[in-house]
Image (cartoon, rainbow, N blue to C red):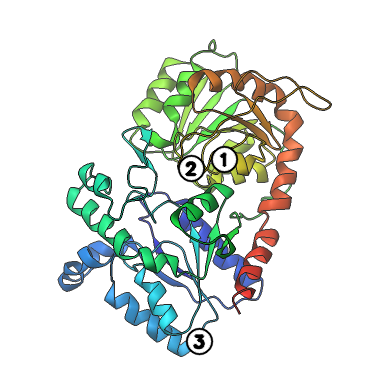
Amino acid sequence: MAHNRYREAQPSGENTIVDAEIAQLTAAGVEVLPFIRSSDEIPSMSKSAKALLPISPIWAPRAQEDLSRLITEHRPDVLHLHNPYPLISPWIVRTAHRHGVPVVQTVHNYRQVCSSGLYFRDGMICQDCRGRALGVPAIVHRCYRGSRAQSALMATTLAVHRGTWRSVDRFVALTSAVADHLRDYGIPAERIVVKPNGIPDPGAPAPLGDGFLYMARLSPEKGLDLLLDAWRRHPDGALGPLRIAGDGELRPLAEAAAAERADVTYLGPLDRAGVRAAIEASAVIVAASTWHDVLPTVIIEAFAAGRPVLGTALGGIPYLLGADAPREPAGTGPAAVATAAPGEGRVALPTGVAAGEAGWVVPPEPAAMAAALPVARAGAATLAPAARARYERTFHPDVVTKRLLDVYASLS
């Protein structure tokens, strides 16, 4: 299991998922050899090691040597790669293949094409680098770490390793939207398996709390401003409480909203116990992303706790919610959202609001989100059992681990 951990100061769902996956596979009787690097190692590196950092996304020689030794000693059946940047490099795929070891990669973002991995720039969805041999727009707009030099390096890395990625034996797409992205990139459908992440079972859900919880990295693409715009269209107190959890560059926005209205509370960053308490205190979780969010872990956490979700119809969110809203192919812009039709077991919904199996999806627009908020509050108790059932059927560790083992077995 190969993964370059993100800095601990930058909360990462990927780090959490990799740790959980190692634990789940080990519990299932699989011998897991962690091949882990961490970006937190960089400040303490020697001068010679730091001198090689600029080329490490393209080729990280020490990581290749270490992997070769591990493979020679242990002869693993498969290499499972998550994030290779910056200390592992996609070259790890070539190293594994040189030793005859097949490679599986879980795709957590869009970095086969996009230097930032988000398909998002300047507050809007951006796909200017799709279909280009070299992502020049990423360089012009400093899309990677705000640096033109580092963006040039990442764009070059993506160009150099286009063939590397296309040689991966099996891709794990976390949602159907990621599978669309990979097919658009040129990966044959038979080498793509849709398998979401799972999280440990927290146990029987607590009774529903009240109001809404927004829990995410407080950065523009996560849609806090969208939610607050929608929230302000209702009188103070009309929807119950809104709790905001997380940290990031938009923290002042959360703090200002909490100071402005009595029904908004900013909880700050939370530890695991705090996360669970915040979820249990709420009735509905909001995923207001304005980018093609791949798989917000907070949605799975909500389902595990028996809380339905109100989300935007972008990226993997409709898939997670079991929504029957049609999607355009990944990369063509915001998904279309169907209005739920009245019928047996259904209620008429405001225009633009679609009901899913375990929540509601709306376009990433304030008016649609505002219309959906009272619908979600009124329907939370009805959909709560369905949310927990969706977790047990789709995101429980027993389910996702078996599917992952089937992926490995298909390569033997």
Q: Tag 2, which secondary structure?
A: loop
Q: Is residue 186 left or right of residue 41?
A: right
* Amino acid, disc 2: Asp
Between discs 1 and 3, the one toward the N terminus: 3
* Amino acid, disc 1: Ile
- Asked whether the viewer can see residue 205, the reply is no
- Reply above or below: 173 against 90: above
Between discs 2 and 3, the one toward the N terminus: 3
- Which residue is label 1 attached to? 317
Say which residue appears at 53% left-offset and 62% top-offset: 188
Q: Tag 1, which secondary structure?
A: helix
25 or 8, which is in the foreground? Answer: 25
Between discs 1 and 2, the one toward the N terminus: 2
* Amino acid, disc 3: Arg
Mark 2 and mark 3 in contact? Answer it, CB < 8 Å.
Answer: no
Q: Tag 3, which secondary structure?
A: loop
From mark 1 to mark 2, how far is it between C-alphas?
A: 7 Å
Say which residue appears at 70% left-offset and 61% top-offset: 398
Q: Position of residue 180 (x, y in %)?
A: 53, 50
Classify the position of the C terminus by image quarter: bottom right
Toward the right, the furthest residue is 344
- Reply above or below: 379 against 104: above
Bin the neighbour count of mark 3 within 10 Å (Cα to Cα): few under 14, some 14-19, many 20 and up: few
- Which residue is label 2 attached to? 293
Q: Position of residue 137 (x, y in %)?
A: 26, 44
Toward the top, the furthest residue is 235
112 or 210, which is in the foreground? Answer: 112
From mark 2 to mark 3, how far is it between C-alphas?
A: 36 Å
Mark 1 and mark 2 in contact? Answer it, CB < 8 Å.
Answer: yes
- Which residue is label 3 attached to? 75
